[in-house]
Image (tube, rainbow, N blue to C red):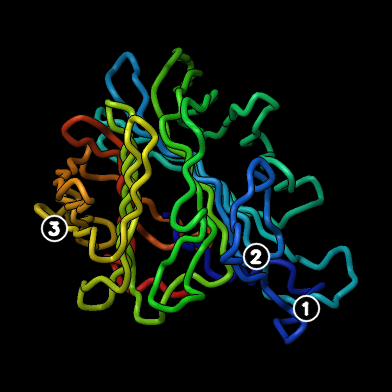
Amino acid sequence: MRLLRLAVLSLLGFAACGWADDRVAYAPVPKDAPVVLPRDHGAHPNFKTEWWYVTGWLQTKGGPVGFQVTFFRSRLPFDDGNPSRFAARQVVVGHVALADPVVGHLEQGQRLAREGFGLAEAATGDTDVVFGDWRLVRDKEGSFTARAGTARFTLDLHLRPTQPALLQGDRGYSRKGPGQDEASAYFSMPHLAVTGRLTRGARTETIRGEAWLDREWSSNLLNPRSVGWDWAGLNMDDGSAVTVFRVRDAQGHPVWAGGSVRGADGTLTLLGPGDVAFAPRRRWHSPRTGADYPVETTVSVTTPAGTKHFELRPLMDDQEFDTRRTGGPVYWEGAVEVDGGRGYLELVGYGGKVNF
């Protein structure tokens, strides 16, 4: 699960747009066949927000590093009836991060622009998101090319699927709260085989690794009681894939929880609110924001075969990502390992309630 990171980005397009009125209608997520592939690899501009979220582990000469390449598209709540081509109706945001224990903290970059005018584009029909020299594109064979970077590093990656897409929830209809409309359309692509290059300064090295892609879109995600969430996606060494999440209230109690376990043989088990439990073991205090994140956590997953405990351990503690300047929250997005696998853990709302 990747929940909404983007606040309303009203700084763009003032002059050409009016504020939201009853002519702005966001599309609801349909319960019947919410995900149809390959069509839904592309953008969904009638929904309030969506993302292409890639996280993974890379093997470098200096050891393992984690990485993130993410693109968001958000439909602004401005008057649909405005005929001006300068009216800002869509915003595209890009995030990139590298987690290297040698560096000791998250190296990150972010961009924001209105869609169009050669600045940023998110195509419908298939994955083709371009933001200047940053991009995520799906080719005819189904593989992805990703490029993004900062002044300190650049990632040029090829991501090849080794398994079919995993439709989360009911054929892709993923509940996020007790209300029937608190849901998203959601599918994942675990166990992506990664090859490519990592450039740092004048040095470029060939790298390889494994990644996870989340695709999600919605117009209404969270219950009003929600203050944040925890999410993890784990690529297990035996070929299985584990997705877990919980949405938290102000007391830290789950508003909703869920996920899935897909076995190495392809058997899919869906998880409901009573099947997932998060138990923090160790917290890390951010010296920059004062947030306390449960960076070591035991996640218990109950399936018909019994209960299994996954002890998540961070590649390094300081994987805090501050996305406030592109309209998002401060949160922890980090590479983690478990016995028999590795993946990413996301911790949002630990520095205060995340508002939408």
Task: Pick whichever, 33 or 24, lies toward us.
Answer: 33
Q: Nearer the viewer, mark 1 or mark 2?
A: 2
Quadrant (top left, top right, bottom left, bottom right) of the N terminus: bottom left
Q: Which mark is residue 279?
A: 3
Lower sequence index among marks 1 and 2: 2
Between the C-alphas of marks 2 and 3, the distance is 34 Å
Q: SS at mark 1?
A: loop
Q: Position of residue 160 (x, y in %)?
A: 52, 24
Lower sequence index among marks 1 and 3: 1
Residue denoted by label 2:
47
Left or right: residue 37 compared with residue 337: right
Between the C-alphas of marks 1 and 3, the distance is 45 Å
Q: In the displayed orientation, state which residue is furthest to the bottom.
A: 22
Q: Position of residue 68 (x, y in %)?
A: 44, 39
The amino acid type of the residue labelled 2 equals: Phe
Q: Which mark is residue 79?
A: 1
The amino acid type of the residue labelled 1 equals: Asp
Between the C-alphas of marks 1 and 2, the distance is 15 Å
Q: Is residue 99 above or below residue 311?
A: above
